[in-house]
Each structure stands twice: as structure tokens, then as C-alpha cells.
Amino acid sequence: MFDRLTTALRGIGHRFIDRVWRLGSAARFFFYTLALSGESLRRFHLTIREIYFTGVLSLIIILVSALFVGMVLGLQGYNTLQKYGSSEAIGVLVALSLVRELGPVVTALLFAGRAGTAITAEIGLMRATEQLSAMEMMAVNPIARVVAPRFWAGVISMPLLAAMFSLMGVFGGYLVAVPLLGIDDGAFWSQMQANVDFHEDIVNGVIKSFVFGVACTIIALFEGYDAPPTAEGVSRATTRTVVNSSLAVLGLDFVLTSFMFG
Amino acid sequence: MTDNIVEINNLSFAYNSRLLHKGINMRFPRGKVVAIMGGSGSGKTTLLRLIGGQLKPSEGAVKVDGRVVHEQTTAEIYRMRRKMGMLFQFGALFTDLSVFDNVAFPMREHTDLPESIIRDLVLLKLNAVGLRGARDLMPSELSGGMSRRVALARSVALDPSIIMYDEPFAGLDPISMGVIVNLIRNLNDALGATSIVVTHDVHETFSFVDYVYFVSAGVVVAEGTPDELRASNMPFVHQFVHGEADGPVPFHYAAPDYRQDLLRDAHV
């Protein structure tokens, strides 16, 4: 009985220490990436190439999702607002929800699923097939040459993707509100213009998506770099990327929101 | 300047608290092709990583060009690696780059040469391994032997003075094997380099190397020129050279007594 208890306790302790240890090596990895970023900024074509893979290729899923999210927001918002006789405020509701919350958060979640997994799997397989080792032996630091360009590509892409998400979402909301539900065109836009503040809403949304970009990309890169060089290892790392990125995004969103709008 | 470009002195290395090497001494003279042989799992590849500074020895030291590898800073180790080429077991080609770009990679990273000169150099290297015509292929379109030749061209792209080969013959057909053997010897002599070949393929290796070290259970058990070793009557060398299943190197992984093992299972 006592034996079992100590084993259980020891198990918990082990897991805890393991997590903390991993967190520490992730943080070290992050700082190392920042310190070795010079080359990816100097030879910017390396980063541009990765922006194409992480950013441009994510566009379709981001834009299509945004359109539907915007349309659903329009429908749901109309239903509720109509009860209080203020259905003209639908434009404000759609725009604020998107710019402040849904734009950055949903983009980050989709980004983790679309681009994050690709980054993890690619780097994990590069490690498994000794490509990273080969690079080291060629006196090229893989953090500077492989990790840093992908990191900056993710950090640059995310705010742009989030901005496009919000834009497309507003358009989706417009499609539902004006042509479908018959809200006045002028009211829709003018209310939105009057009630969305550039600093308060848009800049804060951009800051959020920038933070999410850093978090999602570094998680994807670390999981790939740290993955055991086996098929199972890479598959687990890919799963962990999605789980950890999603949790990080939602957790950070709460913290940021309470600072910005609390 | 010593005659040995690489020296391994009394080197011990433990991996996950398992002692892989116990006091290894080796000399690699300039201009020679030296083989490190031993069974699978005897830590031969680890020796190459120790020479390249990717791992640190637990005791003893590896000296490259008279300088102890693990006492240098990271920047110095990177500088040292520019003089080294390494051929990985499965080539380790960059799968997102074409054959041409793979060979050009070290040149583009380490030199400021204009593209026109890089093009000439890449074609020169690819021609040496007979794959000039394959320059636009992607690594996924190459056979095992071809990938290894491309990787060889890439590892000698900057004319290194030390070339390391990790199992260059594993999984190759006899023709590709012959091609690689000739390439290793010719590249070594043409570049005036020193080659270290890690392998367990006795007959191919004995045909072209200058000196051989046999490693088993973490120590050097025999060394000499191929002729000396062929004539040797040491049990280990005999077993290895003649490919006998049992001998000083046991066929069985350490296990309890077979009879007792079977009986114990019966009671469960």
C-alpha cells in the first residue's frame, strides 16, 4: 500500500520534472533561434521561400474559413440583435468579433493545423534522415539555416493572414446582412466605421496575432527539432504541435484580452 | 605539423551511461585511406561524430590537425568542419533541393563565388561521380547508389582535407560498390586528402585501403595493413574476415541460460 503510494508520487514527480525540463529546453531553443536570426534576415530570400510555404499556401483555408465564420456571425448576430431592435449594429458586431478575437484566434488555430504540422513533420524527417546532422558536418548551423527562416516566416505570415481573415469575415458578414437579410447598406458600414477604433481594436488584434505567430511557429519548430528520429516519434511530435499550439493560443488569448480589454 | 592529421588518444565515450568506447587509440596519417571495421553496433559511426565534434568524449581526446576537438569553441569547431567532408550512410541529401543545388549547397553557404563559377564547379564534381546528366533530378528520383554518389560529390564540394565515410557500401549492388570503391580511392589521391572509412564489408575494403583498425566491444582488437590482417591468426580477425557466425564475437546477445529460460516460461 505504502509502496504503491510512493510509486504513484514518484511518477507524478517524474512527469512534472520532465515537463519543466522540456519547457526549459524549448525556451533555450527559442533564444538560440533569436540569437542566430541574423542570417535569415540578411539573406532574406531564405525567409521569403518559407513565407510562401507557410503563408501563401495557407491562404485558401484561411480565406474560405473566414468567409463562413463571417456569414455565421451575421446570421447569429442578426437573430439576437433583432430582439432588441438594433439589427443595424450587425456590422459592428461582426467587425469587432473578428478584429478583436476570431481573426487572430481562429487564424492561429488553422495555422497550427495547416502550417505548424507541416513544419514539424518536415524538420522531424530532416532529423530522422540525418539531413540536419549532414548540415552540421558541412559547418552550417541548422538553427540558423533551417529553423530561423521558418520562424520569421511564421511570425511575418500570421498577422497578415489574420488581417486577411478579418477582411474576408467582414465580407462574409456583409453578404448575409445586406443582400440576404436586407439590412441597410449605409447603416452596416457607417456603424462599423463609427465604432471600430484603430488603436483599441485593430492594433490590439494585430499584436495578438503577432504573439500567436511567435508561439505557434516556435512550438512547431521545437517539436520537429526535438522529435525522436522514428516514424512514431515524428507522428507524436506532429500531434503535440497541434495540441500545444492550440492550448498556447487559447491561454495567451485570455491573458492578452484581460490586459487589452479587461 | 604532425604526420597524423587525426589522432585519437585514449578515448572513452559513454552513451546513456553505457560505455561504448574504452580507451581507443588510432592514428590517421595524411594522404592515407584508413578503415575502421567492426560489427554492427560497435560504435564506429560514433567515432566519426567524435572526430567531427558533434559528440564530446567522456575521457581522452580527439586531435584534428594537432588541436584537441572538444576544447575548441563552437565557432572553431565549425571552422574545422569546413576542412572535413562526411558521407552519411544513406546520403542525407536535402530532399527539398535538386541534385545540382545539393552539391552547390556548401559552396553557396561558405563562399562568395559567382553563380557561373559555382555552376562549373558543381558540374566538375558531378562529372567525377558520373552524374552530370542527373543534375536536374530530385533526390527522391535517385536510386540508393546514385544518392550516395551525389552525396559523395557534395561532401567533396569544398575540396576537404579529411573525408569520412559512414558505411559507404551498405545496401549497394556489386557494380555500385565497385564504383564507390574507385571513387573513394581516386578522390583521396586526387585531392591529397585523408580518408576514414567506417565499414564492415571486409573484401571490398581490404582491396583498396592502406590501413585497418578492428574495433570490438569498445576497444581496438587488431590493426595493420590488409595483407598483415589477412595473414593474422587472431581469432577475432579470423572470424571477421571469414564471416563465421560464432567465435570471439558471440552470435547470441547476452541472455540467461537457454534451458532455464524455457523452463521458467513453462511455469508462468
Image (spheres, coloured by chain):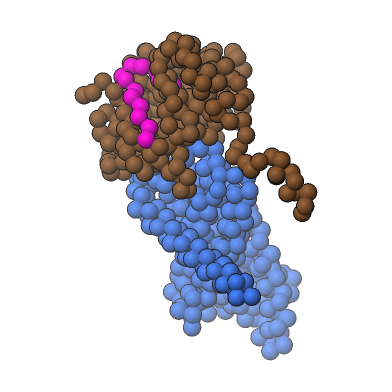
Chain colours: A blue, B brown
- Point out residue B115 in the picture as x, y percentages from the top left corner: 39, 26
Q: Residue B87 colored magenta? A: no
Specify the segment rendered in magenta.
Answer: B23-36
Can you see residue B11?
yes
Residue at 49 percent across and 15 percent down: it is B233
Can you see residue A115?
no
State the image quarter where residue B190 is shown.
top left
- Magenta segment, principal secondary structure? strand
Residue at 63 percent across and 48 percent down: it is A232
Given residues A199 and A190, the one toward you in this image is A199
In the rendered image, the residue lying farthest to the bottom is A84
- Point out residue B90 in the picture as x, y percentages from the top left corner: 54, 30
State the image quarter where residue B117 is shown.
top left
* Quarter of the C terminus of chain B within the rendering: bottom right
Given residues B181 and A114, the one toward you in this image is B181
Q: Is residue A233 above or below residue B92?
A: below
Given residues A152 and B167, the one toward you in this image is B167
Q: How many marks?
A: 0
State the image quarter where residue B213 is shown.
top left
- Point out residue B70 in the picture as x, y percentages from the top left corner: 31, 41
- Point out residue A138 in the picture as x, y percentages from the top left corner: 39, 34
Residue at 47 percent across and 45 percent down: it is B18
